[in-house]
Image: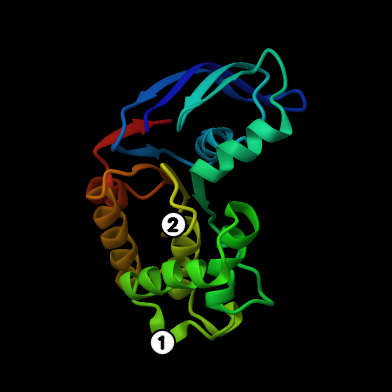
Amino acid sequence: MSIKLNGINCFYGAHQALFDITLDCPQGETLVLLGPSGAGKSSLLRVLNLLEMPRSGSLSIAGNQFDFTKAPSDKAIRELRQNVGMVFQQYNLWPHLTVQQNLIEAPCRVLGLSKDQALARAEKLLERLRLKPYSDRYPLHLSGGQQQRVAIARALMMEPQVLLFDEPTAALDPEITAQIVSIIRELAETGITQVIVTHEVEVARKTASRVVYM
């Protein structure tokens, strides 16, 4: 699904992080937000999932419309997050759940899938992301690259229309970075819309169909 931002202004207290951002990302694009730390890349990404609430402007994403002259309802935010997945820089996996349990928790609780349905979906993603040998492991027993692949699989379990990545290759060695880049490129071939925050020019070059420098 396409993404449209118009006149987005975002503040942290008195500090303005985003200034009148207007942006259009067509469906199926892999849009990379590139730039140095402090440029507002992650703030803009978090706006797309309403983890940050702008003070003004409008957002259209995955069929959801928001006018920030008024606060969106909790129901509207929940509906948005069912259609917009996010892969965090620190992975944010549940440490007390195995890889498989991390994958099936949200689809069962939020989408109402049966455990068998969720397990079948998880099995396909574990195979696709080369994670089957680790399905019964806990996150602390995985490498950074493995945890990142689990985080991607968990986001894909919700079958989102848009997928957001916040510095997906940060602190990963070159070999693992190449694996994550390969996964992002494979996902692009499925037609999903992706937005990626990075400060790594090489990652942007290898993944982006479009780059916005901030």
Residue at 41 percent across and 42 percent down: it is 161
Element type at mark 2: helix
* Kind of residue indicated by mark 1: Pro
Dot 1 crowding, Cα within 10 Å, few <14, some 14–19, many 20+: few
Residue at (24, 38) in percent of width and height: 209
Query: Where 139 falls versus 28 (above or below)?
Result: below
Quadrant of residue 112 within the rendered picture = bottom right
Relative height, residue 140 to residue 173 (above, below): below
Question: In whole angstroms, how far apart are the C-alphas of marks 2 and 1?
Answer: 19 Å
Residue drawn 45% across and 33% down?
62
Answer with left or right where residue 47 lies relative to residue 117. Answer: right
Asked if residue 51 can be seen in this view, the reply is no
In this rendering, would 109 be left or right of 45?
right
Q: In the rendered view of the protein, which quadrant contains the C terminus? A: top left
Query: Does residue 177 appear in this view?
Result: yes
- Between residues 110 and 212, which one lies in front from this camera angle? 110
> Mark 1 — residue?
133
Which color mode does the image show? rainbow
Q: In the image, 201: left or right of 146?
A: left
